[in-house]
Image: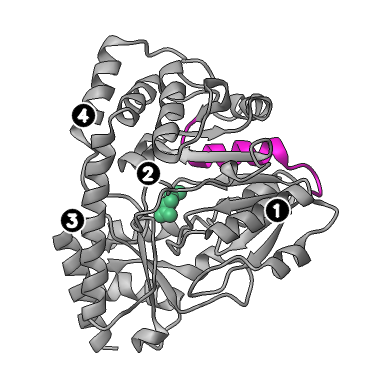
Amino acid sequence: MTHLHLNPIYAEMPVTVFEHMSGLARTLGAINLGQGFPDTPPPPALTAAAMRAMETRSQQYPPSVGVPELRDAVCAFYARTQGLALAREQVVVTSGATEAIAAAILAVVGAGDEVLLFAPAYDAYAPLVRRAGGVPVFIPLSPPAWGYDESAIRAAITPRTRALILNDPLNPTGSVASAEDLALLARVACEHDLVAICDEVWEAVRFDGRVHRSLLAEPSMAQRTIKIGSAGKIFGATGWKVGWMIGDAALAAVLAKAHQFLTFTTPPMLQWAAAEGLTDPAITAALHAEWSASRKVLIEGLASAGFAVLESAATWFTCIDLAASGIALDDRTFSERAVREAGVASIPLSALWEGAGGPTTIVRLCHCKPPAMLEDAVARLSQWRASL
Ligand code: GLN
């Protein structure tokens, strides 16, 4: 066999836990509460807008930074929902938030640069930092509150630290950084001249009644924050892969250079449709009400079946603690067995935790599913647990 010289970062990497679990769910016909996506189609108005744009507007390359209508709609959306004053030049449209994360990391991180990550961390961050030549430095967050610890953060900083990646609200825990956490992170970023790469894709999926607050809005953070958002999460249309990154105009111009040699641009019909969706508050309000109701079904179902549900405030995910639920399996074993034996796919939290020392008894379940499916999943899990 020919020996190929492939990059070991990828050659030795498994497929993502999300792909792995969705693959098993498809093969086994299991209920998929693993990878996060709604089962219902996106709002009809959004689909109609995409089809109208496809039929009546250009299907050629849009501007690399995005169509003006979407860049303006993103600014108006954040003015309306988060009180931010942004201008079109600050917005770069990307093919999903994952591309925005990659572009931001490539634009910021160079050889030997250290990047602070908080564990549990979304699985794309560390490999992308490494591929950019950087070194991920993990700072653990402790359950059940998943708060940010000042001394741990300060101890992790060295003269090589260049950036931090903040996922807030946090996938997989559904927790939200407190006002004190944000003030602390802003203080540390300013003191040490760090860029803050803020993955805020869950900003519109909050169930605590609070307005999302970005690190970008903290004092002195406007110049050094990259705020990343996702139409897929806002509209429950994860396959659309429309996202964006926002920074001060000078920073956005550099981010745009990284984006132009990744995907260059994003399908224009989806950009125009996302722009229409962002300008209609009724669309997001209806989705939010639907997700809020299904979340309640899963949480209440799990609790009454005797599963220990962790507190959460946001995201499409609910976590259960296995040990506290009387289940003597670690999270990976639980997920691998539950998909096969109970017919329910889940995500073991330790898959989003590099190295040892993290919690191994927490499993993530996706709740943006039809209530009957969630009830069926709880019944299956509960029956299976009785057989363990
Ligand atoms: N963000 C999704 C989740 O957390 C996964 C997306 C993906 O599979 N790349 O479930």
Q: CA distance from mark 4 to mark 2?
A: 16 Å
Discs 1/4, front: 1
Q: Which residue lies under the disc numbered 4? A: 45
Label 3 or label 4, whichever comes before in sequence order: 4
At 56% from the left edge and 67% from the top edge, which residue is drawn?
Answer: 147
Q: Which residue lies under the disc numbered 1? A: 187
Q: Which residue lies under the disc numbered 3? A: 370
User: Camera-side residue: 200 or 259?
Assistant: 200
Label 1 or label 3, whichever comes before in sequence order: 1
In the picture, the disc for residue 237 is none
Q: CA distance from mark 1 to mark 3?
A: 42 Å
User: Camera-side residue: 91 or 8?
Assistant: 91
In the picture, the disc for residue 233 is 2
Q: Secondary structure at mark 1?
A: helix
- Which segment is the magenta one? 94-113
Q: Secondary structure at mark 2?
A: helix
Q: CA distance from mark 1 to mark 2?
A: 29 Å
